[in-house]
Amino acid sequence: MAAATQARHVENVDGLILDVENAEKSQVAGLKLAADGHTVLQPQPSDDPNDPLNWTPFKKHIILFIVALSAFAGDFGSGAGIPCIVLQGIEWGMTPDKVNYAGNLNVIFLGIGGLWWIPFVYFWGRAPVLFWTTLAGALFTLGCAVTTNFTTFYALRAMMGFTLTACQTIGLSFIKDMFFFHEHARKIGLWAALFLAAPYCGPLLGNFIIAETGEWRYVFWLVFGVCCIDLVLILMFADETWYNRTIPAQPARGSRIMRVLGVWQIQNHDGNFMTVSRSVGRLTETLMKPIVLPTMLYYAMSFMWSVGINITTSILFETPQELGGYGFSSKAVGFLYFTPIVAVVIGEMFGHYFNDFMANRYIATHQGRFEPEVRLWTCYIALIPMIPGLVLVGQGLHHHLHWAVLVVGWGVYVFGVMTASVAVTTYLLDSFQTASGEVAGYLNFARVVAGFSVGYFQMPWGLKVGYDKSFGTQAAIVGAALIVLFLIQRYGKRLRDKGGPVKF
C-alpha cells in the first residue's frame, strides 16, 4: 500500500490560484509548482509514483494518443459508410436513401452510447471501458464487412456507433486524470482534433477505395483495421488512470494487463470506486447544473451545420452537371475532403496557443487567479469565420459558383467549429472538475443529435427556398448563439456558485 496525500485545488473566493507571482504568500506557501517555477500544479499531486499525475510524459502522451485514436474510430466508421450507400443499394435492391437509414441509426447511437458508457468509468474504471468497447466495436465492424443482407447490416451499424463512441466522451476523464489544470486546453485540443477530423477522413478514404475497387466492403475492412491497431496499442501501453485521492492508502496496483481487462478494478472495488447507483445518478446531477444546458444549446447551435455542409456538398458534387450538380467522380470528391481535415489541423494549431494565451493573460492581470469563463473568449473568435463560411457555402451552391468557393467556405467554417469545440469543452471541464465524463457526454450528445437532425431537412430546405436563404438562416442561428454565449459568460460564475460542484 502506498500512502497518498489527497490532492487539492488551491483557490480563494475569486477563483483558482494558478500562479504564485502576485498571489498572497500565505495561500501559495509550500505548493508544488511546474517546471517554470511559478505555475501552481492543480490539483496538487501526491508523492506516489503510481499517481497518474506523476507518470512520465511518454506514458501520458501514448495513452492520450490511444484514447484519441479510439475516439477517432467512432466517427471514422460512421463517416466511412457514406460513400458505400450507392453500391449497397445496388446489391440489396434498395434506394441509397433507404440504405442510409443504417447510417442515420449509427449516428443516433453515437450520441446514446456516449452517455451510456460514462457511469462505467466510475464503478468499473477507465481502462476496461476503453478496451472492451474497442474490442466490441471491432467485432461489430467485422460483421458489417462480411454481412450479405441489409437487416443484419442495419443492426451491426447501430452497435458500431454504440460501442466505438465511448472514447469521444470518456476521453476527457483520461485527460483530467493524467494532466494538470494548466495543460487541459492543449491536451483537449489534440484529442478533439483527431476525432473531429474523423467524420471527414472516413468519406475521404472511402471514396478513394470505391473509386479504385468498386467494392464497398473494403471500406469496412479499413475501419476494422484501424480498430485492430487501436486494440494492439491498448494492450501494449494503456493503463488505468483512475486514482482515488479521497482514500488514505492506495491498493496495490498489480498487473497492468489485469487493470486493462478490468479484473484489478473488480478485486479492489470497495472504497476505491463508486457504486453503480451513484455513478448513474451523477448523470442527472450534472445535467441539472444551471450552466450545462445553456452550454449544450450554444454548442448545438454552432456545430450542427457542419453535418449539413458535409451531406449537401458531397451529394451535389457527385450530381451530374445536367441535373444541377458539379459532376465530380468519387475520387475527386475524396480529394475535396482534405478541406475540412486541413481546417481542423489549423484550428488545433491556433487554439493550442490562443487558449493558453487568453488564460495566461487573465492570470497575469488578476493576481495569479483564474476563472473558467475566460475560456469562452475564444468562442467569440470562432464565430468570426463560422458566419461568413456558411454564407459563402450558401451563395456558392445557389449561384453554382466555382467549387473552390465552396471549399473555402467549408474550410473556414470548420476552422471555427474546431476552435469553439476546444474552448467549450475546456470551459465545462474547468467548471466541473469532478464530472469530466458527464460534461463530455452531454456535449457529444448535443453535437450528435443536433447534427443528425440537420441531415433530414438540409437538402429539402435548400431546394425549396434556395441555398442562399437556407445557409443564410443557418449563419443567423450561429449569430444568435452569440447571445447564449454572452449570457453564459456574464452569469456563468453566479450559476456555477449556485449549482455547486458535482459531488464525488
Image (tube, rainbow, N blue to C red):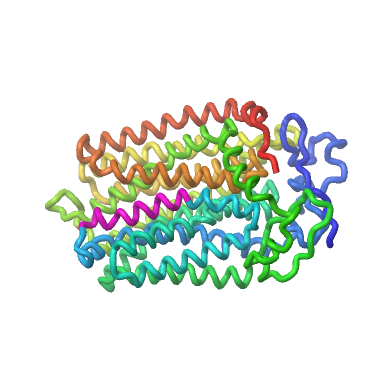
Q: Which residue reaches farthest left? A: 322
Please indicate whether residue 238 sits to the left or right of residue 202 in the image.
right
* Region rendered in magenta: 95-112
Please indicate whether residue 111 sits to the left or right of residue 88 in the image.
right
User: Could you say which is closer to the camera, residue 327 or residue 161?
Assistant: 161
User: Could you say which is closer to the camera, residue 197 or residue 74?
Assistant: 74
User: Could you say which is closer to the camera, residue 95 or residue 332?
Assistant: 95
User: Could you say which is closer to the camera, residue 177 or residue 487?
Assistant: 177
Q: Quadrant of residue 206?
A: bottom left
Q: Quadrant of residue 65?
A: bottom right
> Which x, y percent locates residue 161?
43, 57
Q: Which residue: 34% across, 45% down?
A: 409
Q: Which residue: 53% across, 68% down?
A: 230
> Which x, y percent locates residue 375?
59, 38
Magenta part mainly helix, strand or loop? Answer: helix
**Up-down relation of residue 9 to residue 260 (above or below):** above
Q: Is 379 colored magenta in this rendering?
A: no
Q: Which residue: 39% across, 36% down?
A: 387
Q: Is 105 colored magenta in this rendering?
A: yes
> Which x, y percent locates residue 429?
62, 43
Q: Quadrant of the N terminus?
A: bottom right
Q: Which residue: 64% across, 66% down?
A: 260
Please indicate whether residue 131 sits to the left or right of residue 268 in the image.
left
Q: Quadrant of residue 500?
A: top right
> Which x, y percent locates residue 469?
26, 34
Q: Quadrant of the C terminus?
A: top right
**Up-down relation of residue 264 to residue 273 (above or below):** below
